[in-house]
């Protein structure tokens, strides 16, 4: 990876599959923390570039790291102020919404401790993060949101 980063001919924002996944997206998807670190340090990398497929709803690398439960990757991304942690995918679902749906309490805690996080955003169907936690019977997450 280091050799590729030193080659100016390499386009790190070019999607290499039909889903529009960039190398940074793939690294976040798989939780490859060392590759994520390397790519975060390269100003050429668009760290908020979304996928372009119906499969995953135009998610950002941050969305997918949260959804896949990669806690260390999520922590690393939260520490980079360039990461748009409130960006909604095509249905209006934010990363916080996605983890409230899946029930990942540890990641919900991380996100709720971030001052930049928005808990009031609604999906295109008018659902809040509290609504989705309640629908999925995630009582601990509901409690965290209320606090």
Image: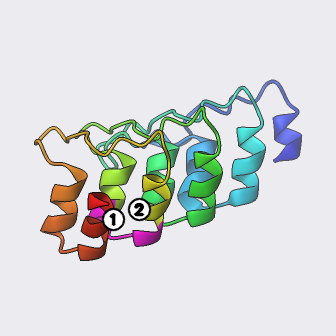
Q: Please name the residue shown 62% across and 44% down the image.
A: 24
Dot 1 corresponds to which residue? Answer: 144
Q: Please name the residue shown 50% across and 48% down the image.
A: 114
Q: Please name the residue shown 72% across and 41% down the image.
A: 39
Horizontally, residue 117 falls left or right of residue 103, namely right
Q: Quadrant of residue 32?
A: bottom right
Given residues 65 and 21, the one toward you in this image is 65
Crowding at mark 2 (Cα within 10 Å: few <14, some 14-19, many 20+)? many
Label located before the other in sequence (1 or 2): 2
Q: Which mark is residue 134?
A: none
Visible in this render: residue 68?
no
Q: How is the image coloured?
A: rainbow
Q: Quadrant of residue 18?
A: top left
Horizontally, residue 110 falls left or right of residue 97, namely right
Q: Is residue 6 above or below residue 75?
A: above
Magenta highlight range: 100-106
**How would you classify the magenta stretch by its main secondary structure?**
helix
Q: Quadrant of residue 105?
A: bottom left
Dot 2 corresponds to which residue? Answer: 108
């Amino acid at each position: 990876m280091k050799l590729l980063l030193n080659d100016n001919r390499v386009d790190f924002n070019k999607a290499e599959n039909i889903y529009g996944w960039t190398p940074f997206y793939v690294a976040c998807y798989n939780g490859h923390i060392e590759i994520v670190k390397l790519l975060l340090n390269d100003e050429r990398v668009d760290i908020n570039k979304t996928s372009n497929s119906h499969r995953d709803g135009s998610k950002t690398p941050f969305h997918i790291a949260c959804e896949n439960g990669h806690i260390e990757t999520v922590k690393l991304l939260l520490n980079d102020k360039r990461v748009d942690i409130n960006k909604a995918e095509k249905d209006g679902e934010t990363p916080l919404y996605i983890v409230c749906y899946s029930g990942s309490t540890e990641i919900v805690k991380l996100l709720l401790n971030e001052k930049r996080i928005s808990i009031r955003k609604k999906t295109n169907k008018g659902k809040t993060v509290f609504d989705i936690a309640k629908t999925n019977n995630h009582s601990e997450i509901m409690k965290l949101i209320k606090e």
